[in-house]
Amino acid sequence: MKTTFAVPIFLVSVLAFALAAQQPDTRMGPQRKAPATSAQPGESAALQLEHDWTQAYLNHDVAALELVLADDWTYSPSDGSFKTRSQYIEEFRVDTMKYQSIDQQNVSVRIYGNTAVVRGEEVIKATDSGKPVTLHIRFTDVLVKTNGRWHAVASHESTIPQAT
């Protein structure tokens, strides 16, 4: 991971989040299809990357996941830890979780030039070592377009508490 990119990416992320709070919300439905009159160039490409990412999970496809994540991608899961791309991919390789479905809801995309902020919620149904698991999460992904291709550069997720 090159540290020279860490500060600019952090600043872009902070700026994107600040600007996102001031922009109108453009929510997508559960199928995450772009609206017929997409007002933002790049929105459908950002949604396609998110779709490819979901398919990588459902198919446990390490190569597809590697195409989605930028070399300097970082991840902050809901447990408060921090993971690099290489750490995450190694964990994914040996993961015992088998994903049955990933239902994405309330997805919004905001484009800022060559940067996109994608927010949404997911209901994930899976099995872990044969035991059923249902996860409800809220996520934010920061995507950057370089050399004509979108990649994820930062991701955060939080668990959505469920009523018991």
Image: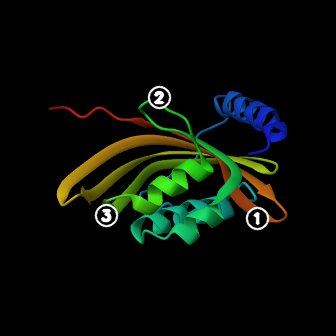
Q: Residue at x 47, y 68 (%)?
A: 55
Q: Is residue 160 above or below residue 86?
A: above
Question: Is label 3 in contact with label 2 (beta carbons under 8 Å)?
Answer: no
| Structure colour scheme | rainbow
Q: Residues within 10 Å of mark 2 (few under 14, many from 20)?
A: few
Mark 2 or mark 3, which is nearer the start of the sequence?
Answer: 2
Mark 3 or mark 1, which is nearer the start of the sequence?
Answer: 3
Q: Which residue is mark 2?
A: 80
At label 3, the amino acid type is: Lys
Q: Residue at x 38, y 58 (%)?
A: 95
Q: Nearer the viewer, residue 32 or 101?
A: 101
Visible residue check, residue 27? no
Q: Residue at x 60, y 66 (%)?
A: 48
Q: Which residue is mark 3?
A: 98
Q: Nearer the viewer, residue 5 or 161?
A: 5
Q: Which residue is mark 1?
A: 149
Q: Secondary structure at mark 2?
A: loop
**How far across and down, in percent of the image, does residue 110 sit?**
67, 46
Mark 1 → mark 2, Cα distance in angstroms: 30 Å
**How far across and down, in percent of the image, does residue 47 sit?**
59, 60
Q: Is residue 142 above or below residue 76?
A: below
Say whether residue 51 is left or right of residue 6: left
Mark 2 or mark 1, which is nearer the start of the sequence?
Answer: 2
Q: Residue at x 69, y 55 (%)?
A: 70
Q: Is residue 32 above or below residue 1?
A: below
